[in-house]
Structures are given as structure tokens and as C-alpha cells.
Image (cartoon, helix red, strand yellow):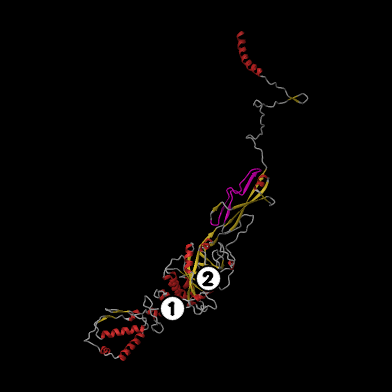
Amino acid sequence: MKKKASQQNLSGFAKFCSAQENKARLSLILAAVIVVGTIGSVSAASIARKSNTLVPSENVELNAAQNFLAQAAIEAGTDETTDIIDVSDFIDETLTTDPTTGNIKRGGLTGEHVVNTSDLKSLSDEDLVKAIVSGNAGVIAKKDIVIDQSQDTKPVHHGSEASAPTPTNTPTPVPTNVPTPTMQPISVVNYELGIDVSVHNGSINWSKVKASGVSFAFIRCGGRGWGEAGNCYEDTRFAENIKNAKAAGVKVGVYFFSQAKTAYEALEEASLTLAKLNGMSLDLPVVMDWETESYYRTWKLGAEDLKNCITAYCSTIAQNGYTPMVYLDGSNINRLGGYFGDVFSKYKLWYAYPYAVYKDGSWYKTGDTVPPRSYSYAYWQYSWHGKVPGISTEVDLDLRILGKTTLGVPKINLPSTEISTEVGKSIDPLGGVTATTSQDNTVTSGITYTITDSSGQTVSLETAQQTTGTYTITYAYTDSFRGKVTTTAAWTVTEATASPTPGGETTETPTPTPGGEATETPTPTPTPGGEATETPVPTPTTEETSESTSGETSGDNNENNSGSDT
């Protein structure tokens, strides 16, 4: 709205002002302040002049007075053109109007940014949460957050460690010398092993941590004191841990130890978290680690207040490009009551529920039971007593759940369950033997066997090969996930037998003569007395042999000759 007034056309009000009656002028200014005050606090209204721009003050009453004086100057006949901004344009009725009284609350918003932190503090939790969710609250500057490092005390976990429920769907095979025990396929979680650390874990050798099997880590960036003062603090090893963990190849996320009792305190905590992150990239979520105990400042916080705190923190984190997550134990999940669905339909859950079975520092293993719950959780803190190479103190152990997979029944595959050999014949008991793993892979390594005789005594392969009898070969394979399985084969060793001829008769080998020709043994001729005598056969000499040969030839000739004589 633009107005231009001239000196020649002065209103009575302008003449009164130009008379410089100070008391009356101040009274009118005060009256204007009261009028504007009835519509509540306003965001700084800007007054643009051709000659200069007045920067709005954080003092709402002073802003109103400036508006009034500008109006008076116009009516007094100034030659300058002035833009007057209607202050009602700066009031977001949906956020600041009390539905019961219709009054405008102190701490109105501009719709784009907050006038100052005192205005934020003056909003009710409900209105502030609405402002945060709608993106109107922004982030509190670090300089406006009270930092008190004395509030950072060594954390102590409270509560008892639960006993893991007896698994009903993960039977453990019992090693026996019988075929594979009866099994059924089972569903197990796919996971990564991780830890969460703070300055209180000391200097960490992240290369050793990585080599031990740790895939990820949540690193504390700061927190709030659990005492009534409840001031914020920074984790002094945060930057060091983030840098070295990343360099070692460990995936990183961040957590803030929260003691927020109001949405404003949660916004403070989120703002300090973002200041510490300073735009760095993360692999995992940013976590609001909300905890309480009987002597904590948060002990009596109600369900709706806790919901507001979580929403304020997580929404701010999400609006700044990070994935938010909430850390709660079972009692604080219950504390949310009916607001559980409101919170965890939007944000991931890191579930704190340690099992006593890991109190010795042992790691979670495939097939171990995870807490069975009707709701889902993305991470599980399963121990407070981890012992990890590279860290001198006990450290919390965590599981990142990546989904589920089905493990089948491991088994040993034999070419035959019955083997028969003769004494002296060698065999390879592992020839052709394979194992099928629970993940349906076929392997040949890792399979072992033992041989027992009919009395159950273990014998060596060499002994069994040389001794007739019946034997049992027991095969064993240990699956990485489902344990040891066994199966057996029967082995019979018999006496060796002679090799028959093709006609089925046994023949004797002729004895070669010295000359190299085989001779047959003459058949004896029985004598009248019943005794057999052998008729001697003269061995022909060389000359007789020659004569016999030539005689046959001559005989033929003689016959021919004789015929001719006749």
C-alpha cells in the first residue's frame, strides 16, 4: 500500500504531531503499541523506503511504533514515498491461534523462518512440532546452544540382560554315527556385526576393529546431561573416530545421547548434531539415543511428550538430508503407548535388548535367536560387554538386520551306500562323495570318514582292505550354519577267487622243452597187472629225422618207379 501526502493538505492528527507535543505523541505511540499487541506477536515487518531500508527489530513493540511513526510522517506531508506492510500478513493463523480463546500466541512464525530462538521457546510443544514438521522452524545456530562439557559423564547401562528364548525353529544336529538327523529348513537373519562408541571408549585402532569382523559403527557426536541442568555437550573424539573408522573401511552412522524433555530441547539436540556433521556423508542413520533412569531428568516424561521430542529431532534430521532413527529399550517403547505407530511408521528403530548369553563378549552367530517381536527393528543392540581387538574397554555390540534367508538341510551325497571288494583291492572312500550345504552349494572339501568293523572297533583303511569282513564307513560334514551331519555306507571285503577260462575249464600250462617247443606228457598204457607202463618213445636224432624226411620223398618216387616196372 503506497500513500503520498502533501504539506498543503494536513490532517488534524498530522498537525498535532508536527507541533511536537512530546507527551501526546508518546501517548499515541503507546496506544498504537497496545492496539497492535492485541493481535499478538508478529514477525519483523519490513519498511522499505526509497532512501534506505529499516531493518526490523526483534522487539515487536518497537516494530509497531516504527510503523506508526511512518504513518504519521506520511500524513505530516513528507515528500518520500513509503511502502507500508500489513503486519497481519506475517501471522500464520494455523500455527499460532489458540482455538479456545482465539488469541494469537506469542512466538508467531513468518511462514519461512523463525524470528528468534526465544520465539521458538515460547511455542507450545504441539505448535513447535507442527512448525518443525512443516519446515518452518529451521535449525538453531550452535552459538545459541549452551555447551557444557562437564555434563559429559561416562554412561552406565541400566536394566537387566534378558535370557535368550529357547529356539523352536533352529534345531541343532546331534553328532552320531547314524545317517543325517531329521531336519527342516529354517529362516534366519542376514546381518552385519557392529559396535557403538564414544569418547569413553578411548583411542581406537580402527584397522584392528575392522579385521575382527566389525562391519559398521555408530559414533557419538554429543549428548545432553542427565541432571536437571540438562546442558548439551560435544563428543571430543567424534571427528577422530569418524575419520579413522571410514579410513579402515568401517561403515559409519552417528548418535546423540538425548535427554530431551521438550520439542525445543530435541530441536536443540538435532541442531547440534547437524553442526557436528557439517554436511559429511554417512553410510548409516543419524540416531536419537533417548534413555532414562529413575534419577534422570527424563524419568517422568509422558507418552505424548516423548513422541513430540522424537518427532522434533527426527524430522529436523530428515529435512537436512540424513536418515533418522530412534534408539529405545523395551520400557521406553512401552512408554510411547499408543504413539508407537505414529513414530515408527516414519522412523527406523534401533532396539536395545541385550542377551545375557553374550555377556562374555562372544559374537552373535548365524542361527542364534533374535528377539521375537510383533514390530520390526533395523538394528539390535545385543550386548553391553563386547571385547573387540583395537578397543581397550568393553564396547556395545550391535546387529544390523539385512533381511532373512532360508537355510536348507545340509547332506552328504554318496555314489553308493553298499561297497564290495576282495582282499587286497584298494578303494578311495571319498571318491565321488560330495556335500550339499545349507545354502545349497555343492562342496567336496571338509568331508571326513571313519571305518569300524563288525564289533564297532575303528580300523584303518589299509587293515580293512587286507582283511575279510564287514565294515561301516561313517561320513561326516560340518555345515557352517547348521552344524554336523553324518551318513554311512556298508563295505564287505571277501576272499580273492581264481580267474576262470572263457569255457569254464581250468587248463594246465604246457611245459616248454629246452628247444623251446612244448611237449605233451604221454598217456600211460595199463599192464595186465593193472599197472600202467609207459611206452618209451625214442627221441629221433638229426640224421634219422633227415632220413625220414627224405624217405617219404623216395617212397613216392619208388611207387612211381614200381609202377613203371610192372
Q: CA distance from mark 1 to mark 2?
A: 36 Å
Q: Point out the image quarter for the C terminus.
A: top right
Q: Secondary structure at mark 1?
A: helix
| Mark 2, other Cα within 10 Å: few <14 / some 14–19 / many ≥20 | some
The answer to whether 101 is drawn above or below residue 208 in the figure is below
Question: Nearer the observer, disc 1 or disc 2?
Answer: 2
The answer to whether 187 appears left or right of 9 in the picture is right
Q: Amino acid at mark 2?
A: His
Span colored in magenta: 410-439
CB of mark 1 within 8 Å of CB of mark 2?
A: no
Decide whether residue 417 is among the magenta residues: yes
Q: Which mark is residue 126?
A: 1
Instruction: Specify the amino acid type for callout 1.
Output: Glu
Callout 2 secondary element: helix
Q: Position of residue 497 (x, y in %)?
A: 66, 40
Residue 277 vs 80, above or below: the answer is above
Q: Nearer the viewer, residue 29 or 389?
A: 389
- The picture quadrant where one finds residue 171 is bottom right
In-front residue for pair 99/111: 111
Q: Residue 200 — which label? A: 2
Q: Position of residue 387 (x, y in %)?
A: 56, 65
